[in-house]
Image (tube, coloured by chain):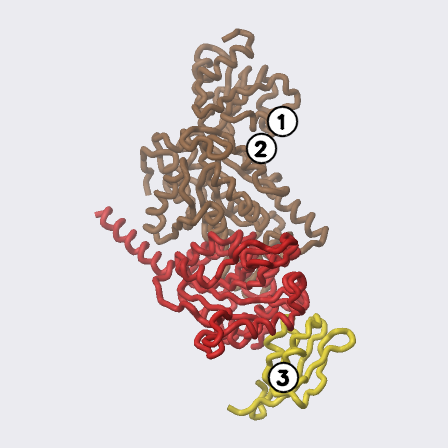
Chain colours: A red, B yellow, C brown
Amino acid sequence: MSVKDYIRERFFPHIWCPGCGHGIVLNSFLRAVEQLKINKNKIVITSGIGCSARISGYVDFHSLHTIHGRALAFATGLKLSKPKLKIIVPMGDGDALAIGGNHFIHAARRNIDVTAIIMNNRIYGMTGGQYSPLSGLNIKASTAPFLTIENDFNIVELAKAAGASFVARTTTYHVLEAVTLLKKAIKHKGFSVIEILSQCPTYFGRKNKKGDACSMLELYKKNTGKIGSKKLNNNPDLIKRGIFVNNNKPEYCEEYEKIIQKAATAAAIRQI
Amino acid sequence: MARLKLKEHLINQDWCKGCGICVHFCPKKVLKLNAMERVEVLNPENCICCKFCELRCPDLAIEVLTTQDGKHD
Amino acid sequence: MTSKIKFVHGNEACVRGALYAGVNFFAGYPITPSTEIAEILSQKLPEQGDKFIQMEDEIASMCAIIGASLTGHKVMTATSGPGFSLKQEALGYACMAEIPCVIVNVQRGGPSTGNPTHVSQGDVNQARWGTHGDHSIIALTASNHQDIFETTVNAFNFAETYRTPVILLFDETICHMREKLIIPRKNDIPIVNRFRTSLKKHVDYHPYLPREDGRLPMSDFGDVHRYNVTGLFHDMWGFPSNNPKIVQELLHHINDKIENSIHEITKYKEHYLENAEYILISYGSSARSAIHMAKNRTQRGEKIGVLELQSLWPFPHALVREKCSKAKAVLVVEMNMGQILNQVKLALGDSKNVFLANRIDGNLITPTNIKALLRVIQGRGV
């Protein structure tokens, strides 16, 4: 098998701009699935709206392209109704954390066995480069001509606080790491979050003078450090990469099975 | 583990959008963008089969075919 | 299984109907006056091995049931006005992606928070046009518990038959009132189950290609056919398309499949309608007052009948025209500012003999309220 066996080739070349990080995320994701050898019929990819969401149409799994911000709510219905499915939810930063922020924290709180891939390009690309909740301070965007004054979320800290049982971060530069972390996230039982910093050269890069896609990838290389690395120890202000949370908390669908047992017992007692 | 040997770079120029990521990050300067801003193989003999061009390609346009112990990888 | 006689509130009648129809997934969010539906299902569904989830809001509830429908389940959510507003975008998604699901709206006063514990029928037009874009919709209602039960079963049947969301518009008064309900025996009411494709693996399955009879066989997510579901305009495989021909055909299809089936969908009851000179058109709890009034007056020799609508959308214009052709005057009895009145006027063309008997103050319209207006119309004074 090659990654081509996992895509719907007739829709390529895809709609993303030249050098878009989302294509690299797709690339890493396909390799992760290929290496895990999961039956294609067992995977549902559920996305919302935005550049990131288009990933669902390109992959040869069951694909559910939904409405803006709500993919995790659809995913919850899919997973709870058919727990043997593997549910993957690729999201953009606006999709996941602005309009979809509530669903994100509640999916994490429930620890439902869904994998959320947050492709963080710090901008709304599909609509033309407006600032997002991940843009952070002093960023130029088409709705922030005088630079942003809003703080950004720290996705990792938010996911941790909300109760996700697997939380990781990587970038589109660190592709081998991305494949490894995606595999771990997908295999993890419980709500897994993987943030992948993903360049948007067209809007974020151009408006903020970050150069082309290659320059943006160089920045990911320079400005991030792997947890436990010497580089990070010497420069603790770098953006951390790696696994931040990995624990075995009770998973929602498994806990629900216990509810069914309890309910059946209670019903049986009533019959007596 | 036996070292990988290059068989060929499969480049899908219909999918390539010419972002240049593969060219920029190739440690051995194997690839180049042509006049049409599509990737081409310049120095295949220098390829060390690290496959970073394939892995980082946002367009799924490159595949590095390799052999190992005479077998296809 | 034998019939069972119950003394229940309307929300429970709805739950009983849903269970009879085969509901096996519910997602909801607490909101008065519909909450009892969620409460009862949180017990009943796990008892039978099925799933109940309380989501983080009404939007999420609507999305969750769509997801669960795609894995082959019969799904429902229940809410009231404010929650119904929140569900609208996902409701439109279900129309576009043709996902069977049932949405209960136990109506309360509005707009906004309105009056959670008082009655209103103010969401009739919202049920029709609440979500954006051209679409058709099925909305049903009922005026007593037996009818709530049967209407709920019908809602599931229509959802499966037409691959569409179906809205149940109930009233606070009925859903919080207790009365007798006879649970029908198994098979007394026919049940429509999920119509699945018989195509085998590797055979090209078209999730959005209607058969000659207009029906679209489904395939469960997780089964052998991997296809795409989207809220974008899409082709017969479910993949996005902006081909004008495909777009137009899709819009025609999602509208025509319902509008062309209006005879199968339309449900109504006649009360003292034969030879009636004055016709009251009503639905839900206001129909109870209308029926009560008509019964009293008929016993005194007056010719007053009631056309009780049990399906509001698609609106049965032809039926109204037929039934009211000989009436001296038509009174639409409803608890809003004339939402069904407008449809009746549309149906009857000449609107000078069509009147609104309404009440919008949070109290149930009474037979006396209706009688007073009728006397004025009759030229008899109050």
Which corner quadrant of the image does residue C185 belong to?
Answer: top left
**Residue assigned mark 3:** B27
Percent position (x, y) of residue A5? 58, 72
Residue at 73% x, 77% y is: B33
User: In the rendered structure, are the residues bearing label 1 and label 3 in contact, judged by CB atoms less than 8 Å apart?
Assistant: no
Q: Disc 3 residue type?
A: Pro
Marks 1 and 2, the one that precedes in the sequence: 2
C214 or C135, nearer to the observer: C135
Q: Kindly identify which numbered label has been placed on residue C347.
A: 1
Is there any visible trace of residue A107 in the rendered image? yes
**Residue assigned mark 2:** C315
Work out whether disc 3 and disc 2 sit on a shared chain.
Answer: no
Label 3 marks which chain's residue? Answer: B
Q: Residues within 10 Å of mark 2 (few under 14, many from 20)?
A: many
Q: Disc 1 residue type?
A: Ala
Q: Secondary structure at mark 2?
A: loop
Compute the Cα span from label 1 to label 3: 76 Å
Q: Closer to the camera: disc 1 or disc 3?
A: 3
Q: Secondary structure at mark 3?
A: loop
Work out whether disc 1 and disc 3 sit on a shared chain.
Answer: no
Label 2 marks which chain's residue? Answer: C
User: In the rendered structure, are the residues bearing label 3 and label 2 in contact, judged by CB atoms less than 8 Å apart?
Assistant: no
Is there any visible trace of residue C196 in the rendered image? no
User: In the rendered structure, are the residues bearing label 1 and label 2 in contact, judged by CB atoms less than 8 Å apart?
Assistant: yes
Label 1 marks which chain's residue? Answer: C
